[in-house]
Amino acid sequence: MANTTTPTMARSFLQVAATEEVAPPLRVVQIEGLVVLKIIKHCKELSPSLVTGQLLGLDVGSVLEVTNCFPFPIREEDEEIEAEGANYQLEMMRCLREVNVDNNTVGWYQSMLFGCFQTVELIETFMNYQENIKRCVCIIYDPSRANQGVLALKALKLSDSFMDLYRSNNFTGEKLREKNLSWVDIFEEIPIKVSNSALISAFMTELEDDTPVTQCDYDRLQLSTSPYLERNVEFLIECMDDLSIEQQKFQYYYRNLSRQQAQQQAWLQKRRSENMSRKAAGEEPLPEEDPSNPVFKPIPEPSRLDSFLITNQIANYCNQINGVSGQSFSRLYLMKALHEN
């Protein structure tokens, strides 16, 4: 009995070992409260300068746990300073490993202003991280929105379909239609869950005041949101101008393409009439395609990546303007009701 079951068990074990385990999709980014405070402190202290930092933690199933972070030095163009920055990161990782702190890189964080983050540089950074870390995220914090009483914290990752297309570096209209990829399919936002230990939660409960309303709560009734709204509208107008420039590039491309197709048809008609005369004279006909002719040289189609990113940014600005305007109208209606009473 034992001899008959042992080979079966061995075969099943080998089969399980040979099969490659498929990681579950990332569902939640769980960040400790101390990490959130470190990110906010770093971004607000150096605002309006844009800063970045390293995220450390663990990848557990469908949850990416962020348990620690440290800031990067401000980047400079000098190669020596960039080398010092790389050495600084390695030294920080070594020090954290010596004190038995999680030192597994799970991504990075960076600051943004007025929701402007969808750039080619962010995509390139994602692709560099993806070479070594299959599941990494970027935590983005906006200090400008914190003044409006909003914790503007987002966890982003690139979609798998977009990464495959980016590696091929082919953002033509035909390829995008084949992959069924639109501008909303570039980034994926992962839900964020802030977690604290039971001791910290108990301590924060002790710090809470018994009075339900404080002076900070009255600040929420401030009616002035014009500076933030004005800057968003200005950036939205700039993005619309950039999108118009991208549209002009495509119009110029299609204009040249239609002109080339007309030249090709004229050349083919001329060649066919010439072949008919040669055939009547008993001579060999000439080929109807001539690759050396500049008329048949394909015109490169401009990449649609920039227009996709600009469209994403326009949608982001519109959502922010919609949110701020909705809150402003609610406060105005509230104050109107108070005055009438």
Image (cartoon, rainbow, N blue to C red):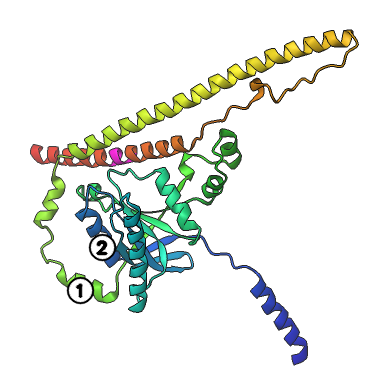
Mark nearest the camera among 1 and 2 is 2
Q: Residue at x 28, y 75 (%)?
A: 198
Can residue 57 be spotted in the picture? yes
Query: What secondary structure is marked by label 2?
Result: helix
Q: Residue at x 42, y 64 (%)?
A: 64
Q: Is residue 320 left or right of residue 291?
A: left
Q: Which residue is mark 1?
A: 203
In this view, 246 is above or below 145: above
Residue 83 x/y as whole percent: 36, 59
Residue 92 x/y as whole percent: 33, 69
Residue 193 x/y as whole percent: 35, 62
Which span is picked out in magenta?
319-323
In the rendered structure, find residue 38 and report the number of the disc placed on it: 2
Q: Residue at x 24, y 58 (%)?
A: 42
Amino acid type at image mark 1: Phe
In this view, 12 is above or below 185: below
Q: Of callouts 1 and 2, which one flags the residue occurring earlier in the amino acid sequence?
A: 2
Q: Which of 149/170 is in front?
A: 170
Q: Which of 164/218 is in front?
A: 164
Q: As drawn, which residue projects farthest toward the bottom?
A: 2
Is 150 inside the magenta-drawn segment? no
Q: Quadrant of the C terminus?
A: top left
Query: What secondary structure is marked by label 1?
Result: helix
Q: Quadrant of the N terminus?
A: bottom right
Q: CA distance from mark 1 to mark 2?
A: 19 Å
